[in-house]
Amino acid sequence: MSALNERTERYYTLYKDNIKRISESSSPYINSFREAAIGRFNELGIPTKKNETYKYTSLDTFFNHDFKSCFIPVAQDFVKAEEFRCDVTDLDAHGIVLLNGFYPTIHDKLRELPGGIWIGSLNEAAKKFSKKIEMHYGKYAEDDKDGLVHLNTAMASDGVFIYVPEDVVLKKPIQIVNLVQSDEDIFNQHRNLIIVEKNADVTLIVCDHTLSPQKFLTNGVTEIYVGENSHFDIIRVQNEHNNAGKITHTFIHQERNSVASSNNITLHGGLVRNSTHHYLGGEGAESYSYGLYLADKFQHVDNYVNVNHAFPNCTSNQLFKGVLDDMATGAFNGRIFVRKDAQGTLAYQKNSSILLTDDAKMDTKPQLEIYADDVRCSHGATVGQLDENALFYLQSRGINKREARLMLMFGFAHDVIQNIKVEALRERMDNLVMQRLKGELSRCASCMVKCG
Amino acid sequence: MGKDKDKIISEVTSGEYKYGFYSDIEMEQIPKGLSEDVVRIISKKKNEPDWLLEFRLKAFRHWQTMKMPEWANLIIPKINYQDIIFYSAPKQKAKYESIDDIDPELKKTFDKLGIPLEEQKHLAGVAVDAVMDSVSVKTTFRETLAESGIIFCSFSDAVKEYPDLVKRYMGTVVPYTDNFFASLNSAVFSDGSFCYIPKGVRCPMELSTYFRINAASTGQFERTLLVADEESYVSYLEGCTAPMRDENQLHAAIVEIIAENNAEVKYSTVQNWYPGDKNGKGGIFNFVTKRGLCRGENSKISWTQIETGSAITWKYPSCILKGDNSTGEFYSVAVVNNHQQADTGTKMIHIGKNTKSTIVSKGISAGQGQNSYRGLVKVLKNAMGARNYSQCDSLLLGDKCGAHTFPYIEVDNQTAIVEHEATTSKIGEDQIFYCNQRGISTEGAIGLIVNGYAREVINKLPMEFAVEAQKLLQISLEGSVG
Amino acid sequence: MLAIENLKVEIDGKKILKGISLEVKAGEIHAIMGPNGSGKSTLAAVLAGREFAMVTEGTVTYMGKNLLDMPPEERSKEGIFLGFQYPIEIPGVSMVNFMKTAVNEHRKHKGLEPLSASDFLKMMRDKKELVEIDSKLANRSVNEGFSGGEKKKNEIFQMAMLEPELAILDETDSGLDIDALRIVANGVNRIKRPDTSAIVITHYQRLLDFIVPDVVHVLYDGRIVKTAGKELAHELEKKGYDWIKKEVDKNNLS
Ligand SMILES: Nc1ncnc2c1ncn2[C@@H]1O[C@H](COP(=O)(O)OP(=O)(O)OP(=O)(O)O)[C@@H](O)[C@H]1O
Ligand SMILES: [Mg+2]
C-alpha cells in the first residue's frame, strides 16, 4: 500500500475510534454529514504536491506525525485561556476566547450581542437555530475537492456560530481569540458557521495564538454567508509558533450587492496554509481578498485564493504580499474564474514577494480562467528585492541603509495593512509588522513559548 | 456589444482555410498500427544504423509505460494509436539527383503552397527543407550553404552523413523520456531537418522547413535538430499546412536547439495546420515539444510563434538558460476560432548567472475557441541576477470563447527579479468608435486593432513572413507602408 | 449644412441635453462655450454617432440627410470630423496604417482609387508640415504614449488628412502650449475652405482670437441659453458664467 493510502487509513482509523464520542456531543443535523464526508475523504485523501492546489506545499511533516488524539472539548483546564488578554489595548471589541477552536466555558455557550446578534458554540446553536443551520451548514464547503475539508466535516465536533439578523449594523468588531494549548501533541479540527442576513454590517477579527510548545495541527473550516446588500469583513491574524501547523479553509458565499473582504495576516507560524474561496453569487457583489505573510527560519506560508464570478457585474480584487527571510518559503496560488454569463466582470489580482536571503524561496501561480467576453481582468506577480532606486533616494536624504530598507519593507507591507478598517487594529498591525521586520518579534507577541 | 458588432466579429474571424487541398501522389505506406515491429520497420526503411534503432526501441518501451498527460486545459478525444499510419512517404527514386526527378505533382503541391522547390524561383535568401508526410522531399540551397560550412539537410541524410554530430546532440535537450509525445516521437520519427552552423559563421540566409501533411490517416512525427556552434547566428523558420479532412490527424514533433558560447538562434513558426471545420470536425492535433538549450555563455535563443491552425495545440517552446549571461525569448500570438483549443506557452529555466528571459504572449479567442497560456519561469538557486519579464494578454472576440492564463513562477534566488503581468479584455468600444469616426468600418477597425495587438510579436518575424502572418490574422492593410 | 432641431439626449436615463436647436450654414464657424458638465462633449459625441448617449427626441439633418440614421463611419465619410476631447489610444496600430486605412475608406466612398504607398506618404509629409507635427509621432502607435498636447495636435493632423466639410473640435485647445495653440489654430484656418464649416468647443477666448467665430453659443445645463456674435466670448472671458446662470435661473423662476 502506498504512503498516501496508509496515511488516509490512519485518519480513517482516528475517525472510527472517535466518531461515537464526537457524535454524542454534536447535533443530529451536523452528524448527518459525517459518513458521506469520510467517504469523500477516503477518496481524496490528504493532499500531496501532486494535487495542483498543493503543488508548493508539503503537509508531510504534520500529517505523517502521529498525533495521539484529536482534540474534543471535555472538562479541561482552561485557566490559561481565561487569563489570556488580548494586547491590542485600544481595541474595543465584543470578544470571545476559544481554546483549540472550542468554547472553553461550560456556561454561556451562546450569548446575545446588541442588535440581536448571536454568538457561541455551533453545537449549542444547533438547538436554537436549527432552521438557519439546516439552511447554511455544509452548503458552501460541500463541493470542495480538498480532502481536508471533508475530513473536517466528518470529524469536527464544534466551532463558532455567529448569527447577524437583517438590518443590523454592529459598530464594534467581534473578536475571536483562538488559543491552542495542550499537554500533548494534538490534531484539532473545528467548524465555524457565520450567517449575515440582508442589509447588515459586521467586522470579525480572528487572532490565533499558541500557548504551549507541543506540536499542533489545526484544520479549520469556516463557512460564511453574506446576504444581499450586506457588508462583512474578516481579518485573521495568525501568530503561532514554529511547531504549529495551521490549515484554514474559508468559504465566503455572497448574495447580490454584498461586499465582503478577507484579510489574512500571517506574522508567525510553522506551516500555514490558508485557502479562501469567494463565491460571487449575485449581481453587483464585490469581494476583496488580502494577505500579508512575513516568514523566516523554516516557516512556510501558502495562500490559495479562489474567486468565482458566477453572476454579471461583480468586482473582485486580490492583493497578497510577503517578505521571506532565512530559509522561509512562500506560495501563492490565486485563481479568478469568470463564468460564461458573468458579463461586466472586473477582476484584479496581484502578488508581490520580497526575498531577503539566498535560501528563501517563493512560488507563485496566479491564474485567470475566463469564459465571458465583456470583462476586464488582470493579474500581476513579482518576486524580487527592494527597489534599488528607492533605497538610494532614501539614503541620499541621509537615512542609513538599514533604516531605509526597513522603511521600504514597511511600506511594502503597509499596502495590505491599510485595508484594515478598524483603526486600533490597523495601528497595532503596523506596529507588529514593524517589530517583526526589525527582528524584535522573533517569537509571537504575548507568546509564552520560546520556539526559537 | 450589439448584435451587429457580434455579426461583424464573426465575419472578421471566419476566414476560409486556404491550404485544404489534397494532392494525389503515389505514396508508400506501411499498415496502420504501432508496435515494436513497426518501429523496426521504420528504422529499416530508412536504412538506419543500429544505434538509432536502439534509441527508438528504448523510447518505444518507455512510451508504453506512460500515460497521456491530462493537466492541460484541453478536451482531447481519445487517440487510437493502432489506427494511425506511422510511415507514409511519396514514392521516389533512390535519390533525387536533380529537380527533374521529383514527381511533378509533388512540385505542384509545393508551388501551390508558395514554396517552389526550384532554387531560382524561390525567395532570395531563404533555403527550404520541404517535408511531405514522413519524409524530406528536397532541401534547397544545400550546396550554397555548404560553402560556408553550414550543414542543412534532412534528418535522414544527417544520420547517414554526419552520424557523429547527430549522436552527440540528439536527445540531449529533449530526452526520449521527456514526455508522452516526445517519447512517441523518439520511437517513430520519420524525418525532419538537421542544421549545423559552424563556429563564427553567420548564416547568410533564412533557413526554413516547410511541413505538409498530405496522406490520410497518417501521423506526422518529425524531428528538428539545430546546433549553433560558438559565435554563430541563424534565423530559422517553419511553416505547416494540411488538407481539410473530417478525421483528426496527429502531429507530434520535436525540435531541439543547442546554442554554444555567443551563438544566437532565432526560431520562428507560422503554424497553420488545418484547424477543423466550423463545427469542430477534423483538424490536426498539434502536440509538439520544442526546447532550446543555451549551453554557452552569452548565447541566445528566441522563439517566435504565430499559431493560427490546428484543432488542438499543445506546445511550450522553452529555453534552458544554462550558460551565464544567456538570454531566452518567447513571442507568441495564438488564435483560436470556432472549436479550436490551444494550451500553449513556454518554460524559462534560469540556471546560469545573469540570465535573462522575456515572454510576450498574445492570445486571441473567437467563436467557441478556448485559449490558454501556460508558462513556467523557474529561477534556480545559483542563478544570481536572473531577470524575467512576462506579459500575457488575452483578447476576447465574442461571448462564447474563453481565455485562460496559468503562469507558474518559482523563484529560489534572492537576487532574481521576476515580473509577470496579464490582462484579459475585449476590444474597447471607444477604440472602435474612434476608428469609425475616421471613416473606418467596424470590420476594418477590428482588423486593425487585432493586428495592432499582435504587432509586437509579428515584428519579431523575418520580414517576408511577417507579411504572411498578418494575412493569416485576417488583416488587410498593415505592412505595405510603415 | 447642419440643422439640429429640439435635440434631447439621455445617458443612463439621465437627461443631459434638454432640447437643443442649432443651425450651421456652409462656411460658418460656430463656437460653443459653457461651464463644465453642461453637455458640450455630449452634443459633439451625438453628432459623431457615439452610442452611449441615447437620443430621445429631436432631429439632426446634415446635408439634407437624416444624420441620426447613419453609422459613425458613414458620417465620417460624409465629411463630419470630430476632434476628441480625450483622443483614444490604440496600442500597436501605427499612425501610418491607421490613416492610410481611413484615407482610402474616404476615397472609396468618393469613388476614387486608393492612394499608392508613395502618394500616401507624400500626403502625410505635406500635412505634417501644415500642422508642424513631429514626424516621429507618425511612426508611433495611435496616440499611445503621446503627451496631452501631442494628442491634440494629432487630431488636427488627422483633420488635415481627411479634409472634412464639418469639423467639430472639442476642446482641441486645452493642454496646448502657446506656440502649439497658434499652430493648431493656423492649421484649422488653412484647412478650412470657404464652403466648409466648423463647430469649435472651447473654454477660452484665446483660441477664438485665432479662429474667429461667426456665432458664439453658451450651453448651460443641456440648453443653449445664449447666442450672440464673437463679442460674447470676450464678455464671458471677463465675467465668467455666473451672470448667465443667474439670468437663466431667474427666467426659470418667473
Ligand atoms: N458616459 C457617461 N455616463 C454618465 N454620465 C455622463 C457620461 N458622459 C457624460 N456624462 C455626464 O453628462 C454631463 C455632460 O457631460 P459633457 O462631457 O457633455 O460636458 P462638457 O460640457 O463637455 O464638460 P467639459 O467642459 O468639462 O468638457 C455631465 O454631467 C457628465 O457627467
Ligand atoms: Mg467636454
Image (spheres, helix red, strand yellow):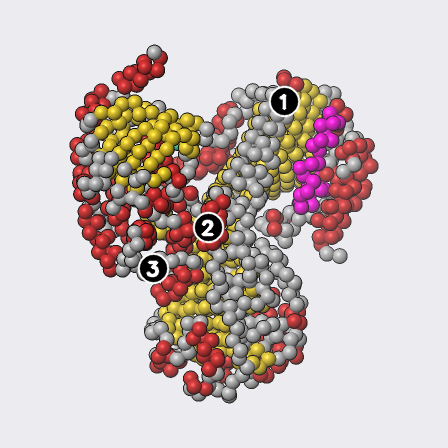
Task: Report the amino acid beneath label 1.
Answer: Glu
User: Do tag 2 and tag 1 residues touch (Cβ < 8 Å)?
Assistant: no
Report x, y in % for residue B443: 42, 51
Residue drawn at x 22%, y 53% as measured from the top left: C123
- Chain letter of the residue carrying label 1: A
Q: Dot 3: within a 10 Å radius of its alpha carbon, few (fewer than 14), some, or many (20 or more) residues?
A: some
Q: Which residues are magenta?
A: A129-152
Q: Secondary structure at mark 1?
A: loop
Callouts 2 and 1 on one subunit:
no
Q: Which residue is mark 1?
A: A166
Q: Could you tell me how far apart the alpha carbons at marks 1 and 3 are, in whole angstroms?
A: 63 Å
- The residue under label 3 is B479
Res B454 quadrant in image? bottom left
Residue A352 included in the magenta stretch of the image: no
Q: Residue at x 69, y 45 (%)?
A: A147
- Amino acid tagged 3: Gly
Locate the N terminus of chain A by quadrant. Answer: bottom right
**In this rendering, is residue B295 above or below C76?**
below
Q: Give the number of the disc on residue B8.
A: 2
